[in-house]
Amino acid sequence: MFEQDYIMRQIHDMIRAILKLFFNVDTESPAVERLEERKENEALEPLLELIDEGRIDEAENRLFEVTGDGSKEDLKLALLFYSHLNDKTDGFLEEHDFSREEIKSGLRDMMKRCGVEGFSDIFF
């Protein structure tokens, strides 16, 4: 229980720090409306719906499909995706065969894709 809370805080703190450093977004809880482009909102909303439905693996696979080039906006999309996922309870994640470790792994993979993998090493 305490280990999961610690991992959850690590993920949360890393996402907040990167949003602040790269996007000048300083918020306790990142939200969809933080995306400036309508196109990015349209990409994120269905992914969050899949998470809420418990189709997490499918949502993550789609995330990696829509963030093909590893641009700055792709990073922001991924951070908001993983922030939403990280806000889910341990019970929800367990029920849908997902873990906080998988969230960390996905974040690392996405940060590597976007060329900022060094930042994940600071937090993890």
Image (tube, helix red, strand yellow):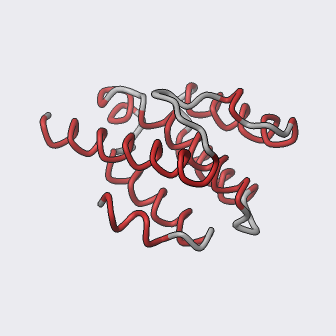
Nearest to the observer: residue 10 or residue 61: 10
Q: Which residue corresponds to the image point at 30% horizontal and 31% vertical from the top-left?
A: 90
For the N terminus, the quadrant is top left
Q: Is 102 located above or below residue 113 in the figure?
A: above
Q: Nearer the viewer, residue 4 or 55?
A: 4
Of all residues, the one furthest to the left in this rendering is 2
Query: Looking at the rendering, which quadrant does residue 121 occupy?
Result: bottom left
Total labels: the figure holds 0
> Could you say which is closer to the camera, residue 36 or residue 24?
24
Q: Residue at x 61, y 50 (%)?
A: 78
Percent position of residue 122, x then y: 33, 64
Front-lying residue, 8 or 15 = 15
Compared to residue 101, the image places residue 109 above or below, namely below
> Residue drawn at (61%, 44%), measured in percent from left and top?
24
Taking the image as shown, residue 97 lies to the left or right of residue 43, namely: left
Q: Quadrant of residue 115?
A: bottom right
Question: Which residue is at a point 32% across and 58% down the rendered structure image?
Answer: 123
Measuring from the top left, give residue 112's x and y in whole percent.
53, 72
- Where, quadrant-wise, is the C terminus in this rendering? bottom left
Left or right? Give the position of 98 relative to 37.
left
Q: Position of residue 108 (x, y in %)?
A: 45, 64
